[in-house]
Amino acid sequence: MIEVKNLRKEFDGEIVLDNINASFHNGMVNMIIGKSGSGKTVLLKCLVGLLSPTSGEIRYDGKNFVGLKSKEVRRLRRDIGMLFQGAALFDSRTVLENVMFPLDMFSRKNRRERKKRAEFCLERVNLLEAANLYPSEISGGMKKRAAIARAIALNPKYLFCDEPNSGLDPKTSQLIDELIHDLTKDFSMTTVVVSHDMNSVINIGDKVIFINEGVKEWEGNKSEVMGTDNEKLNDFVFASDLFKKIKEAEEEKG
Ligand SMILES: Nc1ncnc2c1ncn2[C@@H]1O[C@H](COP(=O)(O)OP(=O)(O)OP(=O)(O)O)[C@@H](O)[C@H]1O
């Protein structure tokens, strides 16, 4: 479990996140949603230590990440898997080599065991047949699956995904969502997904946090999102592609 307490982030005196209090639960897909520019990515970057909060605490299973010594930060980072926007694979390495990269960097296992682990992860995301291909030779959805395999290579306790569906068609997006959901349950990870895709929220959002202009405006679960009486969340939901499609379908029915 990750707990955020009174988190504040300023850039040059400008407040981007203000007094955020939130919990991200084990074995669940915890979604951070909100409009463009609301502060989702800054929050994610604070959570993984890519940005330092101006004030507040980020507790990983009770241990405050803010102010940890660099050795302890490195230890904690090994428990963190990260799926970046756009997959961020190394173009000059094969899919298998990409998945092996974190193992080569951090695992004490020998090469045969590291390869076996990488192949297991590729098998888990249904991509073993592409092990020897290069990123330029595979589709966008396959790249995302390769990046997911790499993110889980070190068997992380915490998985962070920044807009995992960006650039994917709806069907592939759904497959990626389901994969993130299933891995979260299978490996009992604390998964945090930043998204503005309402389809994803409805598909896999066990817990949902809505950020508006740097403030946590609402939290609940996916079944509570659609019927909320929070005006700002309602505006966000009604402006989404999902809602537009539902409305169009209803209008077609008459
Ligand atoms: N390094 C930075 N320096 C200064 N301002 C920043 C920095 N990073 C982000 N910001 C500002 O913080 C605010 C929140 O940005 P953030 O990227 O978190 O939004 P977001 O909700 O993730 O949006 P999107 O959905 O478009 O990615 C924006 O106003 C942005 O300009």
Image (spheres, rainbow, N blue to C red):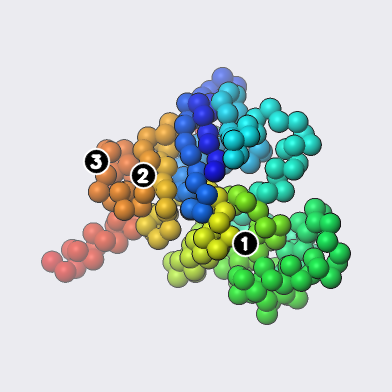
* Residue that mark 1 sits on: 148
Query: Residue 238, labelled with which disc?
Result: none
Q: Is residue 71 left or right of residue 253?
A: right
N-term-proximal mark, 1 vs 3: 1
N-term-proximal mark, 1 vs 2: 1
Disc 1 vs disc 2: Cβ atoms closer than 8 Å?
no
* Residue that mark 3 sits on: 229
* Residue at image location 33% in from the left, 58% down from the top: 242
Image quadrant of ligand 1?
top right
- Determine if the C-beta at disc 1 is less than 8 A from ligand 1: no
Q: Is residue 232 left or right of residue 61?
A: left
- In the picture, residue 110 is in which quadrant? bottom right
The residues bearing labels 1 and 3 have C-alpha atoms spaced at a distance of: 35 Å
Three-letter code, disc 3: Asp
* Residue that mark 2 sits on: 220
Please state, as top left, top right, bottom left or bottom right, where the C terminus lies in the image.
bottom left
